[in-house]
Image (cartoon, grey):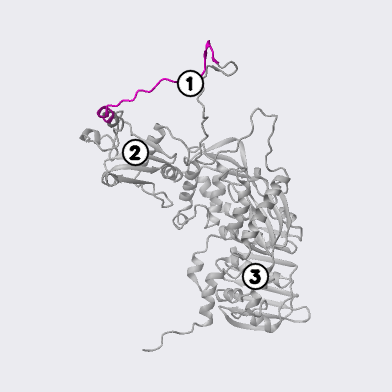
Amino acid sequence: MSDIIKLLPDSVANQIAAGEVIQRPASVIKELVENSVDAGATEIKIYIKDAGRTMIQIVDNGSGMSETDARMAFERHATSKIRSASDLFALSTMGFRGEALPSICAISQVEVKTRTENQQIGTHLMIKATKVESQQPVACEKGTSISVKNLFFNVPARRKFLKSDNVELSNIMREFERLALVNNKIRMSIDTGNKTLDLRPASFKQRINDIWKSSLDLQLLPIEVDTALIKIKGFVSRPEYARRRNPLQYLIVNGRNMKHPYFHKAIVGCYDSLIAQDTQPCYFLKFEVDPDTIDVNIHPTKNEIKFENEQEIWPILHASVKAALGKFGAVPSIDFSLDTLPVAPLREGELPKKPSLDIPEDYNPFTGTVIGDPNKQFSGKYNEKKIKINENWDELYSNFMKNTRGFGFEEKSKEEEDKLPGLINDTKNNLLCLQLLDKYIVTTSREGIIIIDQRRAHIKILFEDFKKNISVRQPSMGMMFPDSIEIDPSLQESLEEIMPELQLAGFQLEYESENRWNITGIPSYAVNIDARDIILGMLESVVDSSYNYGTEKLNALALTDRLAYIMARQGAVKYGQKLNETEMETIVSNLFSLGEASYTPKGERIFTVITESKLNSYF
């Protein structure tokens, strides 16, 4: 048998690596800017053309590269950051694997101009799909300028799956915000062709305000903790400024952005009972730890970090956020001048506890007598009348069967079954519906008992209704007092992407200032909606594929259908919400009048049927 295992060419290996490291134009910017930071640059300029498809150029004033280094930098696993495996546990640089540059040049055309401080002439290098086309001397400034052109030109499948220019620009701006926040001591600018942002070196808090250009200054509480294990410095938002959409949440470790669900939970847990359950606080926190105690080499993008002492860091972080909220008066205090003391809000699905004593309305607590009859003493038991227990079991069973008519176990006449196809009616010609756990609706059919998820059913009903309305341009209902909405800079480009769909649905927006828009009109068919929440939800859904309700099925929906789904989620009944008989009957009948009622647009099951045979098997 002939040998079948072959060594892949470098060009193929680099393209495979590029699939992990370079996901979109924003990934190129991240890798190149981090290289500029490692080179000691104090000024970094970014130029974008056609949302990064045509060109991405990064210009810095860092240390630059020699002629040999410029050539070697694009070889796989060539790096100046580490020399041995032990160096991985003492990293002080952003890059270290030597994969980014070869991955980039494997899927694009790269042009490099670079010069070190002690050289008079720099180097001009041209590379196309890992092949060096030319290298020659050139007069240039100290530092490095890298232009990445025609991204994914030789991987048409990857290029085809890039989003629209507005969406890719939004992702680029989000990545720029992360990089600028981490490197607040470096001057950073970006020019996208129709938008320019220039950030001067500043303190951490000033950089936050420079990026988001809103009143964040008044919303933030400072945190500064210095222990032998970790140093924490940064800001968390006041509870009253928690966001329902697009919370600004940044964790930075030793100058590197990271995602860490465990530490996120430590922060958010401090806001329990202070903010609504569907909102999130903003936070901007920098950690400084011993590099020996973390491992950043666990993900190609280096955004996930493993901590050796995360169990010990958790209570430090939790306590520091709690202390900041308490120190600056963010935690509500008890006001003894009130007639009643404040009570913590109930959690979703939780019901208030009933008093343990059942005291009559005519009881006088000062005399211990019943009002109107001062000679009669109140014993503490309001109704001592004994309940007569019916011991006639045949009569009890007969009454029970009368009260449970509609559950589908007794014989039904043909006329009764035809009143509502598939569903069984009671004697009042209405569906018999019961609510279970304030979450499910229980009704019956000829097949057995139907258990319906009330929220999912309502989402499906509203989705189909909104979808039908959006398909035809609807009149907009003007607002007497327009509602204002602040849209973060990274989402401004995406607003143009969804504006036609919003206008088709009946939303009207007017530009007011740099980040602020006014909502002047809402759809006439959906008056009880939170327009701000829907617009922000749409913006995030087109930018972030890992969004709250972002699944592969939802991401494939047209923008109009996605808008209908977001509106339906926002307007549907919630879990824990009590429904009366009419509301339950309306949901059930509307659900089963749809052509397809089994699954939500997200693919979640709406109802299940317990057949009579299945029920009998339990007994």
Q: Nearer the viewer, residue 567 or 380?
A: 380
Judge whether residue 465 is colored magenta: no
Q: Which mark is residue 51?
A: none
Q: Is residue 216 visible?
A: no
Q: Which mark is residue 32?
A: 3
Between label 2 and label 3, give the one nearer the viewer: 2
**Residue 554's spot in the image, x, y percent?**
46, 54
Amino acid found under the numbered disc labelled 3: Leu
Considering the numbered disc 1 on the image, is that residue within a helix, a strand or a loop?
loop
Magenta range is: 369-397
Mark 2 to mark 3 CA distance (whole Å): 60 Å
Label 2: few (<14), some (14–19) or many (≥20) C-alpha neighbours in 10 Å? many
Of label 3 and label 1, which has the lower sequence position? Answer: 3
Q: Does the residue at mark 2 contact the one at mark 3 (Cβ under 8 Å)?
A: no
Considering the numbered disc 3 on the image, is that residue within a helix, a strand or a loop?
helix
Residue placed under numbered mark 2 in the picture:
443
Task: Report the number of numbered marks.
Answer: 3
Of label 2 and label 3, which has the lower sequence position? Answer: 3
Q: Is residue 385 above or below residue 135?
A: above
